[in-house]
Image (spheres, grey):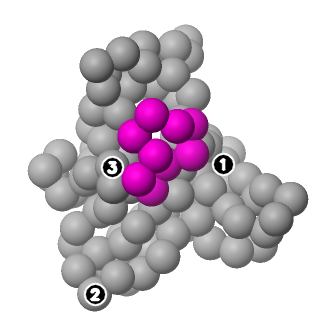
Amino acid sequence: MSTPFRMRDDGIDLFVRLTPKAALDRLESVETLADGRSHLKARVRAVPENGAANQALERLLAKALGVSASAVSIVAGGTARLKTVRIAGDPAKLAKGIEALGQQS
């Protein structure tokens, strides 16, 4: 199984499949698509209007990984379910945190 992120010099790019209007905010398991790409599944209560769901995802990831909210930003897929989220920080530490999140489910 491939990892749901790509390492960068100043952090990582995390691939996420976001489901808005969920019953609660939570990060789920890592899922692999038929083409071999992996992504972390996430659910937020916010609706996908005016960027509310994206902001909720950024806050959820920041809290789960122990980084500031300003270190998390969506860089691709702003209006799509599949998103690329850039997280600034120590890449090795962030990678371990994401791997731990993916194994919780």
Expressed as whole percent of the image width and height from the top left, the position of residue 91 reads 33, 80
Which stretch appears magenta? 76-84
Residue located farthest toward the bottom when viewing the structure as drawn = 9
- Tell me the SS state at disc 3: strand
Q: Is residue 65 above or below residue 93?
A: above
CA gap, disc 3 and disc 1: 20 Å
Give the residue at mark 2: 9
Q: Nearer the viewer, residue 70 or 83?
A: 83
Expressed as whole percent of the image width and height from the top left, the position of residue 73 reads 26, 51
- Tell me the SS state at disc 2: loop
Q: Is there any visible trace of residue 101 in the rendered image?
A: no
The residue type indicated by label 1 comes to Ser
Give the residue at mark 3: 74
Residue 29: give its label: 1
| Circle 2 crowding by C-alpha within 10 Å: few under 14, some 14–19, many from 20 | few
Q: Earlier in the sequence, mark 3 or mark 2?
A: 2
Q: Nearer the viewer, residue 58 or 50?
A: 50
Give the foreground label among 3 and 1: 3
The residue that appears at 41% across and 53% down in the rendered structure is: 76
Residue 50: give its label: none
